[in-house]
Amino acid sequence: MAVRDEDGRANFGDIMQRSSGEMPLSPWLRKKLQDTAWMQSHPYHGVVLTANGALQRTMSAWYQSEIKVEVIFNREIQEMISWAHPFVKQYDRRVQMSCCGEVFCVATSRIILSEQRAVDAVESGGVGIAQLFKHFRILPRFYLTDAGAQSCPGGVQLWRDYVLEGSGIECRIREDFSPNFLDLKPKQGYPEKDAAISRCRSNSRSNSISLEPHLGDLLKGTRCLNVLEDEIAKSASPLQRALLTAAGTVLRIITSYHKVAVTVGQVKSCPMPGVTKASYQRCVLMFCEGVAFCRARTLMTIESTEMKEQVDCGQCDLGELFRVYGLLPEFELQQVRLTAEGDAVPGFGR
């Protein structure tokens, strides 16, 4: 089987990353954090550290529970000096994230809008600040700019700074985590987790849960119930749950968890035979230290004539389309399977 190296190309395994083989953590930041809990404690800290607009999804997979977001404030900044463009607006926003009744993260954002359509959408009252990327279907770029650890009354508190930016919308975000954010205990009087999950699933089916997108999970809402069915969840590890529910971040999760580069090799990428529509099939293998750990197969239909021409002439690979055109996709998990291979060697897929 011939496998073509795809290093240097974007792909569905990390749709915000510029190329496969790129480490989510820069060398200088890795060196700075070497002796902190970000690098020395449970490897899931690395997944949290590099989560790109997916913190709620990441934490929901860890706890197999609902993550809630509460807005503390959201206000426009009144400028003393006018910007060069009259439609530039700035906002300060703070939210807190909780699980099982316990707050584990406070996120403070400075949001700068430099596009008239974004300002109009917010000032009309129809679109919230945190909904702009989803509303305009913008796939933002992610930059982890700094992170660290600091002492606090309860122990050592981890923090990180990052930027989400695209099409005139820039969000500079600081997240401060509680010392025990990966070891939360349900707050006294809070329903047991299994009962809470059942209740939330019921509410979700009756559409009582808000599905408005949020900066903590660009593809979900202010209440993220990103959990698997009980039978699968009890057999799966937190890492498996994170991978099974990942929305375009499988490579980032593996790279950040194991702290090694992941590369992608293309097995096949071609039009579907005998199909009149612009349909394509794609198959890639993902490698970690030379070992193939995942096969990903894609069936894709392209409705845009411009995109089809770019793919057909070789100017853009199928895996690069979302990144090149800055399009935020919609994610739907259709099926999950946890199986055993050979002598009970775990294998799973979706």
Image (cartoon, rainbow, N blue to C red):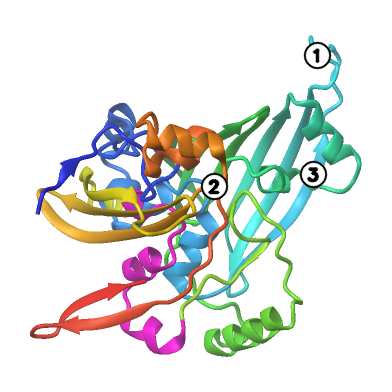
| Image coordinates for residue 152, horizontal then vertical, percent | 50, 48
The image shows residue 204, relative to residue 143, as above or below, that is below
Q: Position of residue 106 (x, y in %)?
A: 61, 51
Q: Does the magenta portion include 102?
A: no
Q: Is residue 87 visible to us here? A: yes
Question: What residue did someone put label 1 on?
Answer: 85
Q: Are marks 1 and 3 in contact (CB under 8 Å)?
A: no
In the rendered structure, which segment of residues is drawn in magenta?
Answer: 229-253
Q: Which residue is mark 3?
A: 74
Q: How many angstroms separate mark 3 from mark 2 (CA)?
A: 18 Å
- Tell me the number on the disc at residue 220: none
Q: Which residue is mark 2?
A: 176
Q: Is residue 329 above or below residue 338?
A: above
Quarter placement of the N terminus: bottom left
Identified at 34% across, 80% down, the residue is 337
Amino acid marked by disc 2: Asp
Which residue is rendered at x = 42% and y = 64% of the image? 182
The quadrant of the rendering that contains the C terminus is: bottom left
